[in-house]
Image: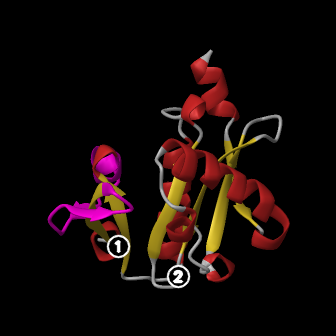
Amino acid sequence: MISDLSSAIVVKVANWLQDQKELIRLRNLVFIQEQKVSPELEFDGLDDVCIHLKALTHSGQFIGTSRLLPSHYIGRMCVLKEYRQQGAGSQMLNYYIHHALVRGLPHLKLNAQLTALQFYQQFGFIQDSDVFIEADIEHVHMTLSLAELTR
């Protein structure tokens, strides 16, 4: 049954103004309630300048989101617990990589929670910092050099 759900997950570009309520709800559930991130840290006032993605089930239920800052940082990637490991995160990351390649961006960057380190490494992101604490969670900085992908 999981493979059926996986193939039914679709990732689309979100419109922050139209989808804001659902995207905030997802981030509230994952980051604030599940991971205990403070709302002040989670909602930093930068959402209106980002490219947002939404992951949806075949029935249109919002199950994940992420954003890309103008500085080429991927962030706020989250998927509801019951839908993790089913491809939504991979689809979002593939979208950002394709988006960056088409636009000739030199790199993508992110701060990865240690629990997600291997996930990002599968896409070619390289850890380039020591462990640091962000929102009381261990993270590392990672970079994907897009020049490496175009060779």
- Answer few, some or many: residues within 10 Å of disc 1's Cα (few below 14, many 20 plus, some between 14 and 19): some
Which residue is at the front of the view, 87 or 103? Answer: 87
Please report the residue visible at 55 percent of the width from the left and 54 percent of the height from the top: 92
Badge 2 amino acid: Arg
First in residue order: circle 1 vs circle 2: 2
Badge 1 amino acid: Leu
Please report the residue visible at 18 percent of the width from the left and 61 percent of the height from the top: 131
**124 sits left or right of 37 in the view:** left
Quickly name the residue at label 1: 146
Q: Say the numbered circle drawn on residue 103.
A: 2
Residue 104 position within the rendered picture, expressed as x and y whole percent measured from the top left: 46, 83
Residue 26 position within the rendered picture, expressed as x and y whole percent measured from the top left: 66, 50
**Number of on-image labels:** 2
* Residue, far top: 1
Range of the magenta residues?
A: 116-137
* Secondary structure under the numbered disc 2 in the rendered image: loop
**105 sits left or right of 117 in the view:** right
| Magenta region includes residue 21 | no
Q: Say the numbered circle drawn on residue 118.
A: none
Mark 1 → mark 2, Cα distance in angstroms: 11 Å
Residue 100 position within the rendered picture, expressed as x and y whole percent measured from the top left: 49, 74
Residue 131, compared with residue 25, is above or below; it is below
- Answer few, some or many: residues within 10 Å of disc 2's Cα (few below 14, many 20 plus, some between 14 and 19): few
| Magenta region includes residue 120 | yes
Q: Quadrant of the N terminus?
A: top right
Please report the residue visible at 28 percent of the width from the left and 45 percent of the height from the top: 118
